[in-house]
Amino acid sequence: MTHAQAAKRFTADVDRTTWHDGALWFVRQKRDRMAYSLPEWEELRELASQIKNHTLSRLDEYLEEFERNATANGIRVHWAANAQEHNEIVLQIIRQHNGKRLVKSKSMLTEECHLNPFLIKEGIEVVDTDLGERIIQFNDEPPSHIVLPAIHLKKEDVGQIFHKHLGTPEGASDPQFLTETARQHLRGHFVAADVALSGVNFAIAETGGFVVCTNEGNADLGVTLAPVHIASMGIEKMIPRLDHLGVYTRLLARSATGQLSTTYTSHFHRPRPGQELHVIIVDNGRVEQLGRPDFRASLKCIRCGACMNTCPVYRRSGGHSYDYTVPGPIGSILSPNVDLKKHSTLPFASTLCGSCSDVCPVKIDIHVQLYKWRQIIGSQKAMPAGKRVGMQLLAKVLARPRLYARLGRVARRMLASTPSALTHNGTINPWAIAREMPEPPKQSFREWYAANQK
Ligand code: SF4
């Protein structure tokens, strides 16, 4: 299914689309207020971008430095080349402890690796403990946003899901009540967990420690109670020094949700007494992206979600229409690296307005990369056949000015005499579904220019 086809399902519910658009725009405005309140905002963005550029240029050295220091601190470091290896390492650690129950805090990497279905198939109980993640886990669907995983659902939807899975009264949708229900439900799982898994927001080469940012404290509760803590991180999470951390923590929460900082910014440097602490460092295609000069900057992403909140296409098409773990503008430049054919329509799911690049706290040139992917997809004939043939015909016409002028005259005459039932037919001309077709001009600009040239 192309992005446009999947988006059509979302936009069929006009009220939900409008509400989704507004909810994300509200978050974008909160982000703006935070950015404007910091005079050094642009300086911070530049610094964050330069530190990441530098880190990516010596990623192998910093990863090894991290491994050395983490190991010296008593952390067990594992390397996974791909999702399968990551999942098997997690399973192996759980089995070594005769574990049966895993609690997870939000980790887009484990979504990317499809860890949940893998472990469940192996007989492990997996409970996502972030509220949004738990809701979509009940609803058996992937996150639609990297920071706000259940943003596509209204409180009434959550009420129905909780009624079905947690036995709350039918129709109960008070957020306070639903949150308290979730808290009580999750508490038992936290206490009973054999292993807790968290993501990693930043890994510090200099100290061998890492930082996890959450708003709910679920990661902290999970990893504090369980005897084993596994932290999964992509290789791009690295920063060289502890001094650099403040640059990113100041940018992350402000960009993500318009907060001064995340409610919990937890530092892990060594296992607490009696606990085992494992870090799994995952490649899963990142090295390949690092080797693409035009796209390596996408690895600077700190997963704040700001590019999603600002993107007019994302806001009105919903995260599920992207059919990739990371949706929105950043997902549209990461996904073709993984499967060019499958995700070939995503770089076209953009107006190229550049708003994503403007809000990105690490200054990724997202819209430039979207445009570059389009060129690659075109040259590799990876786009849908209809679009490919259309573009080839258009290229032929645009390369012949006389033919272009002649066809323009024909099109203007035809448009003027075609009934609106045809020009505004959504199947023939989707462009006109929500727009009026312009009145065809009597002459083209070239004709007007030739006639009026002095
Ligand atoms: S690309 Fe930039 S704006 Fe988008 S999620 Fe990553 S860091 Fe945030």
Image: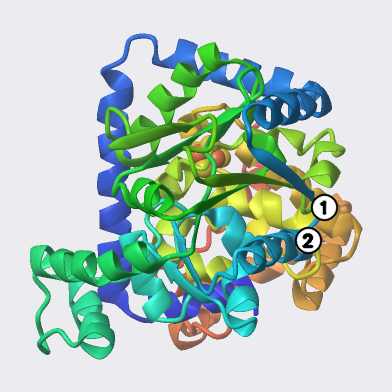
The residue nearer to you, when weighing 170 against 1, is 170
Whether tag 2 and tag 1 are in contact, CB under 8 A, the answer is yes
Residue that mark 2 sits on:
85
The three-letter amino acid code for the residue at tag 1 is: Ala
Q: Say above or below: 329 vs 250.
A: below
On screen, residue 360 versus residue 406, left or right, reads left
Disc 2 crowd rating (10 Å Cα; few below 14, some 14-19, many 20+) is: some
Residue for badge 1: 81
Q: Point out residue 360 in the picture as x, y percentages from the top left corner.
A: 50, 33
The quadrant holding residue 336 is bottom right
Report the residue at 84% width, 58% height from top. Answer: 378
Three-letter amino acid code of the residue under disc 2: Glu
Quick check: can you spot residue 275? yes
Q: Is residue 349 visible?
A: no
Which residue in the rendered view is the most extreme toward the front?
A: 274
| Quadrant of residue 89 within the rendered picture | bottom right
The C terminus - image quarter: top right
Q: Position of residue 249 (x, y in %)?
A: 42, 26
Residue at 21% of width from left, 64% of height from top?
Answer: 183
- Above or below 267: residue 214: below
